[in-house]
Image: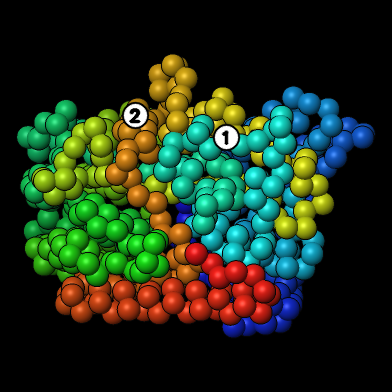
Amino acid sequence: MPGLPDNPNMRPGVGRRAAIGALATSLLAAGLWPRRARSREAIPEGRVIVDYWEKWTGPEGEAVQGIVDRFNTAQDRIWVRRLAVSDIMSKAMVAIGGGDPPDIVGLYSYNIPQFAESGAIISPEDLATPTARLAPESYAPAVHRLLSHEGRQWAGVNTCYSLALYYNRSLFREAGLDPDRPPATIDELDAAADRLAVRTAGGRIARAGFLPNLPAWWPYFWPIMFGGRLYDPDAHRAEVAGPAGVAAYEWVASYPRRLGASATAEFGNIYNRSFHSPQDPFISGRVGMIVQGPWIANFIRLYAPEFDYGCTPVPTPEAMVDPDRPVGMLEADVLVIPRGARHPEAAFEFLCFTQRPDVQEQLATEHAKSSPMRSVSAGFAGDHPNRCVDVHDRIVKSPRVQILPQTRVWQQYADSMIGAFDAIWAGADVHRTLAAAQSRAQQLIDQSRQRRLQRAARSGRGAPA
């Protein structure tokens, strides 16, 4: 499951050695630096040991370990040793900069531009052989875009996720709504939200039909659903303040205006701390509809196995509705091979193994997600723990699905949208707030590109595209 974008610990303009030294010292002092864990079993003699850092823990980490175990027993030359690592982006960059990286790292796809432009990772294209290569045509087109930057593929996919509208079928029936006809348009979503909402005698929200601030993980998501985009990759331009962005956040602002800014903020603050627990607002019935990723199905199975839910692509304005070409946002967890890895060829062999469709389907099934591959086996959906996997699959493969902006400053851009969203929710002017957020994002984009041009000039390399 994804986390909020990490705050970068190495800021542009800080000397690399100074930043690495300061960060490594603080991590070591806090006892947080990755340490090699004991293998589940003795490593057979003669194997090349591939150290693999991965951010997942718990059941999701165990699912990844299952893939590792499968690889380790499928051949007799390489042994992959997985280590769970928190704050993985920062620690990976420190290890690479210090010349002692692992052989393979599990990152987020939005990390790729920074690592690729910094020369911190090796493109799988440079390790491909006539008998071992990653096939771009095997991925869903949008997934391959996530793995690539400036015309080169830099990673393999670990899992991917899209967002969908999950809804409580029992509450739909209770409110007189048809559970087999979920909302497809923004107007239908708003009407269903009003029907599902329940207030106490004192006016507090006892049950929300829908709130755009639950969860608060994707404050930048809404312009996509109104036909806009966050970034023009050709012009290197932030676009969140365009007409679609303004329309999207005017709609977002309609919820606190209609239901009360303080009441909705209070409700959001209470339940944003309860996700993926028995008190999860959707699983507990405190919210009738919610935008979530496919992993929610695993938590429903764990905490409320009898829960009757459905899901559908996130609604859009009526003119944009096309069931065969849903709009959505796509993100992925990825595997990269660091520059300076001790065993890059062995890491690449493991990477190729993980990109096999059957391996991807195994991991996707255990994570309750759709497959990132262009095609899936006949039994994939039938054996899947998420009854809505077909909805996510349609979004992943849709020509209208969008990926996050491929710029190394995306994390700062996303952070700025948190403040913009909160300000709009509290009643700030939408146009001015978005214009300020876009201006700040553009400044970060321009600064990043200028520094890159300067580095290219100093090194004698050509200017970036």
Residue, x 22% and y 64% (percent of image)? 245
Coordinates of residue 428 in the picture (x, y in percent): 19, 77
Mark 1 vs 2: CB contact within 8 A? no
Query: Where residue 71 is drawn, which disc sits there?
Result: none
State the residue position of label 2.
Answer: 390
Q: Which residue is depicted at the point 71% across and 32% down? A: 130
Mark 1 is surrounded, within 10 Å at the Cα level, by few (under 14), some (14 to 19) or many (20 or more) other residues, namely: few
Q: Is residue 446 visible?
A: yes
Q: Amino acid at mark 1?
A: Ala
Whether 313 is drawn above or below 254: the answer is above
Q: Amino acid at mark 2?
A: Asp
Percent x, y of residue 406:
46, 59
The residue at the point 14 percent across, 31 percent down is 181
Q: Which residue matches tag 1?
A: 135
| Residue 421 horizontal side relative to residue 463, left or right | left
Choose mark 1 or mark 2, whichever is in front: 1
Q: Is residue 27 above or below residue 227?
A: below
Q: Nearer the viewer, residue 452 or 355?
A: 452
Side (left or right) of 1 relative to 459: left
Q: Residue furthest top?
A: 378
The one of 60 and 148 positioned closer to us in this rendering: 148
Closer to the chain start, of discs 1 and 2, is: 1
Residue 447: x and y in percent read 48, 79
